[in-house]
Amino acid sequence: MNLVESLQYKLREDGINAYLIPTSDYHQSEYISDYFKSRAYVSGFTGSAGTLVIAINDARLWTDGRYFLQAEVELEGSNISLMKMGQKNFPTINEYLASILDDGSTLAFDGKVVSTNFILDLKKDLGKKSVTFKDNVDLMDLVWPNRPHLPKEQIFILDEFFTGKSYKEKRKEVMNSLKDSGANALLLTSLDDQAWLYNLRGNDISYNPVFLAYTLILEDETILYVDKDKLSQEVSKYLKDNDITVKDYDKVYSDLVDVKKKKFLLDFNKVNYSLYNILKDNNTIINKENPTLILKAIKNEIEIKNTKLAHIKDGIAVTKFMYYLKHNWQKDELTECKAADYLYDCRKALKGFIEPSFTTICGFNEDASMLHFVATPENDRVLDTDGLLLVDSGGQYLEGTTDITRTFAIGNPSHEMKVHFTTVLKSVIALASAVFLRGCRGVNLDILARGPIWKLLIDYRCGTGHGVGHVLNVHEAPNGFRWKIVPERNDSAEIVPGMITTDEPGIYLDRKYGIRTENEMLCVEKGTSEFGDFLGFETITYAPIDLDAILPEMLTEDEKKWLNDYHEMVYEKISPYLENDELAWFKKATRKI
């Protein structure tokens, strides 16, 4: 009996018709610590996004276009059906549940790992059906005997030298925003928002410098619910000096029972259903995005200055990696894993480096056709033929967070590969060169990047770009580029000065190859006229784009100028850190075309 069958047996025994296992923790985080990886443990699918529904005689997993190929491989033989989100002939999770749950049915889930919005929307979609919701069911301990413990990593202070604002300044901004919303209380559960607010960082989730906590903000008090074992004497003193009350992590549930007659601002996408259930009957609830969301997304001058320094460091690492790759791909059976390890070593050697900002994607030829492919010792591929190597990677530095993708020519790529590589470059340049009226959102600008690729009747099943945190999550709402609004991604906000967003169009041909070029861009002011305020972008990623994969005749004169100007900037910023053979090669790698 496999895990799914064991759970189905338990469902029948307990009179439950369906059991919901999302990819989430108590804080609705995109990436989660090992304790919460129930969906991956049960299904075998290891992608970062997906929801598993186990019914008495059926099991289905929903995931998005980034993971279709990966899920097909990892679900093979599991008796779990893959539901391709957003594709024709595949029902949504709510449509499926509405089709199998009748009057008298029971849906079970752990309310601590499911968002309030998800459950309230599901109840609407079930209409007048009398379905029982059992929201306190966690069956994982029955089938997961060696389940990991909750993380207990130490918390550290990120100095105001790097953040640009003190906790007290940020709390004042939050309180002003609450007042404008008609609220006098805030339950903050999203981990990156709390880390940003306190100027604290942790290591409870790999690659995301955050810590498990809840925050209750009242007019005259701030309460941080956290595992006190994570607090050093220095951090404890810092919290005390800032008048922050500290209580045990789990105590938030019992404390909130006694909180009454407050006007709570709750972000239903972030607050879990169990917390909402405690507060909803005795308080006024205002469903609105956390005020920290937009405050965090608009970087201040110090954050911008430091982020650019982080990108110089990252550019040094990626440039040294590119030099190594170009000179060693035919030696010592260089593989995807060895290449990724070398790039990690390049970053690790830099002062202020903390950790990668996500698991490095290093895919050669057909492996790169899977958008989020991760090389392992079991699937590692040798770079032993002509083609393209896609490397998507990033770093967490004390100065900032980086995310960069470069696709490298290995040997002599085919003409088709070069056509597609150059098309992707044209897409990158088109978006990077945009000038637009204040008020535009990512959905207004996305066509600039997709246009050249759509002309080939090709598309990529993901967004064109996402916001980036400051020594925080590499994926940060609410800014991004996408051709249509996807509510659950929450990346369609107005693009305003101070926001940092990636520019990363791509072409992925199933089981052939993948191409992506990715830079980060800072939104800046361009000027004002009688027609309004105009904005644009400053590219702040500093690493060569592989000229060996470009067909110059496909580029317009303006596109060549953009590329030449970009490489001139990269050379100016990175060359002081190179010497001898590396410097001679680098000058050629950034030459004008």
Image: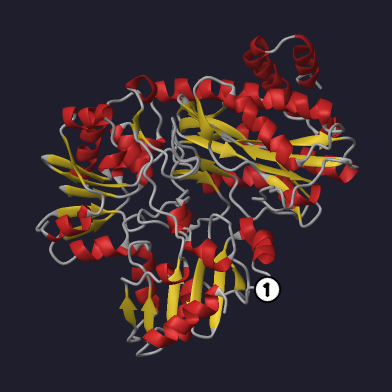
Q: x, y percentage for residue 533?
A: 45, 31
Mark 1 lies on residue: 77
Label 1 sits on a secondary structure element that is loop
| Left or right of 163 in this view: 373 | right
Residue at image position (45%, 25%) is: 398
- When asked about the image quadrant of residue 504, the answer is top right
Residue at the outermost bottom position: 103
Image: 272 above or below 532: below
Q: Quadrant of the N terminus?
A: bottom right
Q: Quadrant of the C terminus?
A: top right
Image: 286 above or below 241: below
Residue at image position (46%, 39%) is: 495
Image: 32 above or below 301: below
Does residue 502 appear anywhere in the picture? yes
542 or 529: which is nearer to us? 542
Q: x, y percentage for residue 555?
A: 79, 33
535 or 485: which is nearer to us? 485
